[in-house]
């Protein structure tokens, strides 16, 4: 795992210089009688408003001379050839885009969207279920609908002529079906409908498009209209 001298914080985007022992710590352990080693690294964002931790790990083959040895704690670069596994443990690889974590997007909506993103690789079924819940929350917040069955809420939107495009209604219905729990009335057992990775990913893409259209874009238009109004009022004065 190549460690660059300049690193970008995955949480806040802050660019900083890697300084072993100050914001970067590393260990490598190898098997006593073999050549397989594990290299772990911890990076701490030095930005005063962040300070969050990033953790990476790599497994590979080490030179015979390093067998059974533990590397120095503050050494960030190690000789680990032929890596066969590499991952970032923190933060989770798939997390919601921070551009949607704004005052315009309800906190509960962002939470469900973020969970759908985080679960995408580990469990597409669980991801799609969170995506469904997220969309239902979005619909209720945006259109002030009385809580009920998602299917009925979508039908209500479809009946509101000019309020929502048909392709959006179709997308909502698709996400509802993909992420639903199917109730079995015979024994009252709930079975999660099978969902693959691509289907779950597409539900997240629908969410992101609607988050922008329903929450971010209107706020931006209102902001620009306010700025234009201020200019006009200033000229009148």
Image: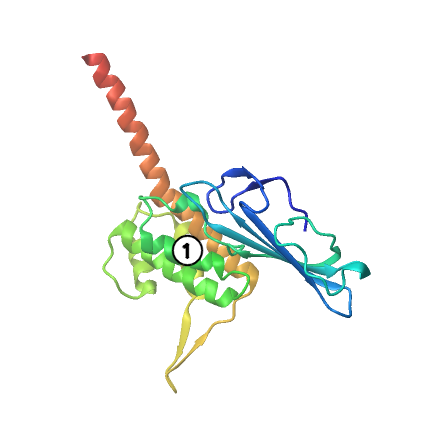
Q: Is 104 or 57 nearer to us in this picture?
A: 57
Residue at the disc numbered 1: 113
Color theme of the render? rainbow
Determine whether 236 is above or below 6 in the image. above
Count of number-bearing discs: 1
In the image as oriented, which residue stretches furthest toward the left? 237
Q: Position of residue 155 (x, y in %)?
A: 32, 59
Residue 33 seen anywhere in this rendered image of the structure: yes
Quadrant where the C terminus sits is: top left
Label 1: which secondary element: helix
Q: Is 125 or 85 nearer to us in this picture?
A: 85
Q: Quadrant of residue 20?
A: top right
| 198 relative to 33 in the view: left or right | left
In the image as oriented, which residue stretches furthest toward the right? 64
| 89 relative to 76 in the view: left or right | left
Residue 158 seen anywhere in this rendered image of the structure: no
| Crowdedness near tag 1: few (<14), some (14–19) or many (≥20) residues, C-alpha within 10 Å | many
Q: Is 204 or 96 nearer to us in this picture?
A: 96
Residue at left offset 64%, top offset 42%:
4
Determine whether 136 is above or below 50 in the image. below
Determine whether 227 is above or below 177 in the image. above
Residue at left offset 24%, top offset 53%:
144
Q: Position of residue 11 (x, y in %)?
A: 47, 47
In the image as oriented, which residue stretches furthest toward the bottom? 187
Residue at left offset 73%, top offset 65%:
68
Residue at left offset 39%, top offset 87%:
187
| 87 relative to 14 in the view: left or right | right
Q: Quadrant of residue 217?
A: top left
Q: Position of residue 189 (x, y in %)?
A: 40, 82
Q: Position of residue 26 (x, y in %)?
A: 61, 53
């Amino acid at each position: 795992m190549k460690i660059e001298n300049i690193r970008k914080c995955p949480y806040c985007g802050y660019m900083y210089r890697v300084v072993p022992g100050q914001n970067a710590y590393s260990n490598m352990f190898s098997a006593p009688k073999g050549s397989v080693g594990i290299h772990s690294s911890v990076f701490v964002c030095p930005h005063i408003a962040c300070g969050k931790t990033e953790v990476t790990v790599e497994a590979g083959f080490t030179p015979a001379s390093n067998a059974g040895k533990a590397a120095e704690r503050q050494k960030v670069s190690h000789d680990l050839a032929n890596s066969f596994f590499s991952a970032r443990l923190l933060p989770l690889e798939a997390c919601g885009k921070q551009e949607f974590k704004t005052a315009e997007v309800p906190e509960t909506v962002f939470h469900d969207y973020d969970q759908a993103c985080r679960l995408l690789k580990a469990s597409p079924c669980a991801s799609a279920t969170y995506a469904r819940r997220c969309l239902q929350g979005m619909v209720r917040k945006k259109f002030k609908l009385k809580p009920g069955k998602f299917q009925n809420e979508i039908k209500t939107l479809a009946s509101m002529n000019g309020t929502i495009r048909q392709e959006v209604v179709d997308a909502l219905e698709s996400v509802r079906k993909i992420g639903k729990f199917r109730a079995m009335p015979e024994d009252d057992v709930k079975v999660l409908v099978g969902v693959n990775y691509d289907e779950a990913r597409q539900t997240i893409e629908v969410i992101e498009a609607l988050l922008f259209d329903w929450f971010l874009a209107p706020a931006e238009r209102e902001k620009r209209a306010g700025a234009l109004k201020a200019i006009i009022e200033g000229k009148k004065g």
